Image (spheres, rainbow, N blue to C red):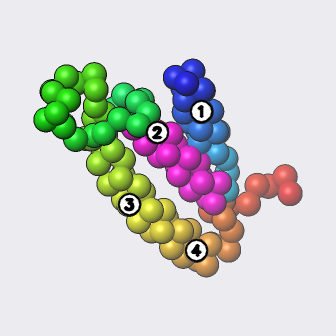
């Protein structure tokens, strides 16, 4: 399971970096979102990948940390998802404003001379 999880995070991060390097602003925004989701999955995975384990300490089971998942990464990822959604909305508004001012959606604001 860890190998599949690691490959998924790696593919998402690589795809995000590839899209960030593209010349169109919409592709850059999608790349930033993919990279943010890859980082969120990485942080979530740092809380130990345990199936059907509670995140809260049960007095009947004792306080052995191997029996529980860490709730802090889950809270951090939930907060990061909300912040990522808000920044993506802000980026889209800035993209539409820049496209209205410059008439193009290239990152540098100019169309390539070869076309």
- Of residue 22 and residue 45, the one placed in the foreground of this image is 45
Q: Earlier in the sequence, mark 1 or mark 2?
A: 1
- Is 101 magenta? The answer is no
Q: Earlier in the sequence, mark 1 or mark 3?
A: 1
Residue at 68 percent of width and 74 percent of height: 103
Residue 35 percent across, percent down from the top left: 52, 43
- Residue, disc 2: 41
Residue 97 percent across, percent down from the top left: 54, 76
Residue at 66 percent of width and 65 percent of height: 105
Query: Looking at the rendering, which quadrant does residue 60 occupy?
Result: top left
Tags 1 and 2 in contact by the CB under 8 Å rule? yes
Category of crowding for the residue at label 2, using alpha-carbon neighbours closer than 10 angstroms: few (below 14), some (14–19), many (at least 20): some
Spatial separation of the CA atoms under disc 1 and disc 2:
9 Å
Q: Secondary structure at mark 3?
A: helix
Q: Secondary structure at mark 1?
A: helix
Tags 1 and 3 in contact by the CB under 8 Å rule? no
Category of crowding for the residue at label 3, using alpha-carbon neighbours closer than 10 angstroms: few (below 14), some (14–19), many (at least 20): few
> Mark number for residue 96?
4
> Mark number for residue 107?
none
- Residue, disc 3: 82
Residue 59 percent across, percent down from the top left: 13, 35
Q: Earlier in the sequence, mark 2 or mark 4?
A: 2
In the displayed structure, would residue 3 be above or below residue 45? above
Q: Which residues are magenta?
A: 25-44
Q: Earlier in the sequence, mark 2 or mark 3?
A: 2
Q: Mark 4 or mark 3: which is in front?
A: 3
Spatial separation of the CA atoms under disc 1 and disc 3:
22 Å
Category of crowding for the residue at label 4, using alpha-carbon neighbours closer than 10 angstroms: few (below 14), some (14–19), many (at least 20): some
Spatial separation of the CA atoms under disc 2 and disc 4:
29 Å
């Amino acid at each position: 399971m860890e190998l599949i999880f690691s490959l998924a995070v790696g593919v998402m991060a690589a795809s995000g970096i590839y899209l960030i390097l593209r010349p169109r602003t919409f592709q850059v925004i999608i790349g930033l979102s993919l990279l943010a989701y890859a980082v969120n999955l990485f942080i979530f995975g740092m809380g130990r990948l345990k199936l059907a384990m509670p995140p809260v300490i049960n007095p009947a089971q004792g306080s052995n940390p191997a029996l529980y998942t860490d709730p802090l990464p889950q809270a951090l990822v939930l907060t990061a998802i909300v912040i990522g959604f808000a920044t993506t909305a802000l980026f889209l508004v800035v993209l539409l404003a820049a496209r209205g001012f410059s008439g193009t959606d290239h990152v540098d604001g100019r169309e390539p001379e070869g076309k």
